[in-house]
Image: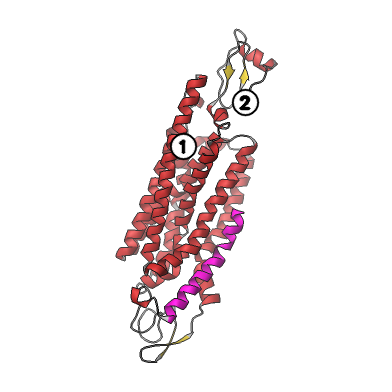
Amino acid sequence: MTKTPNLNASRRFRLGRKQPLTSKRLTEPFLSPGGSVHTTEGIEKSKLRVRWLVLALLSLLMSGNYYCYDNPAALYTPLARRFVTNRQFELYFDGFYSIYSLPNIVLPLIGGVIVDRWGFATSLCLFTSFCLAGQAAVAAACASGSLNGMLVGRAIFGLGGESLSVAQSAFITSWFQDKELALSLGLSLSVARLGSVVNNLMSPRLASAFGSVHAALWAGAAFLSLSLLCALALRCIDGRCSRAIRARFRIEAESSAADGPVSLSAVRRFGRPFWCLAACCVAVYASVLPFNNVSSALLFQRDFFRPGSVWTDDKDGRDWVYDPLHHGRSWPSKHPPGVHCSEARARDEPFCRAIAEAMAKSNEVMSEPFSMSAV
């Protein structure tokens, strides 16, 4: 769509007052007095029907990231059974989130610079690759019984986790404008949050069905593999559409060099509304996410499977007491005598079935806030 030139356009393009057009100055295409159509890649991309496919792929990509981020919380009970002999498991479990969050106080700033310099399509593939490599390392370390290896995997996952959100937001803003921008951002967040819900519902069941917690972690790696395929597809779609638009309207490739070098010192120019929004995000993250990280264990032990319950061994008829704080195999215990619930042969044990059902119920409750935020 074009419109007739206005007075400002005439002044801009008359002899002696020509100025280069940039995406910051131009918000919709128009005709100059000479009859040329002036537009930008962002404006033309926002008219393409393929933008909705782009949004769907971006949303699916982020759902894989959210799925794997919340893996430890959803699998707390299977992980605790897997590392029952390690008295420092609780410390390691908290470390799974601390080692992810601490460096990400700074990493998104670096990620933003990478997005500006390398482009959002390339950055999207890079950060997704970090997430996939980290999740695979977590699953492999869990299979080998190494909590230190799992910490390393979570650190690698953190290298791409939050920066991936930066690249995704930049990608969306390059394809959607005006009223559709807020809608597209909301839709992408809703679908991404469904990844957390699916994780809470499916991960405990996968661990129970396969008899091993690392099988559920590998399922997360498979989900992120799909996310990486989405990132590669998005890079192809964006590149092809950009080349077609540039060829049609003779637009030069957009580059951050036109606006000056990217520098972290630009943070000083952010306005007061930005810092108010940042403070709101900190308040929400500080109050909601820490609780979600431990809520599975809290709900499980408080509401669905309380310590002190008495069970009878089917083999010798001896009673034993469930005690989650006990690290041995003598009475009382965390497991039936002579069997471990993480073993495949223990799936049919009444105690192991009951504990799996309680774990699934606690995760269903834990997924309710994410379900509401997705809507």
Q: Is residue 7 left or right of residue 126?
A: right
| Residue pictured at 40% horizontal, 52% vertical | 157
Q: Which mark is residue 120?
A: 1
- Say which amino acid is labelled 2: Glu
Q: In front here: 260 or 66?
A: 66
Q: Nearer the viewer, residue 284 or 307?
A: 307
Assign the N terminus to one quadrant of the image: top right
Mark 2 to mark 1 CA distance (whole Å) = 22 Å
* Quarter of image, res 52: top right
Can you see residue 203?
A: yes
Q: Is residue 299 above or below residue 252?
A: below
The residue stretch that appears in magenta: 350-375
Residue drawn at point x = 55 percent, y = 23 percent: 22
Amino acid marked by disc 1: Phe
Which comes before the other along the chain, label 2 or label 1?
2
Mark 2 = which residue? 28
Query: Regarding mark 2 in the picture, which secondary structure is present there?
Result: loop
Q: Magenta stretch containing residue 331, yes or no?
A: no
**Number of dots carrying numbers:** 2
Left or right: where 184 falls relative to 336: right
Q: Position of residue 318 (x, y in %)?
A: 39, 91
In x, y percent, where is residue 285? 56, 55
Judge whether residue 257 can be spotted in this image. Answer: no
Residue 11 in the image: x percent, y percent?
65, 13
The part of the image, by quadrant, that contains residue 172 is top right
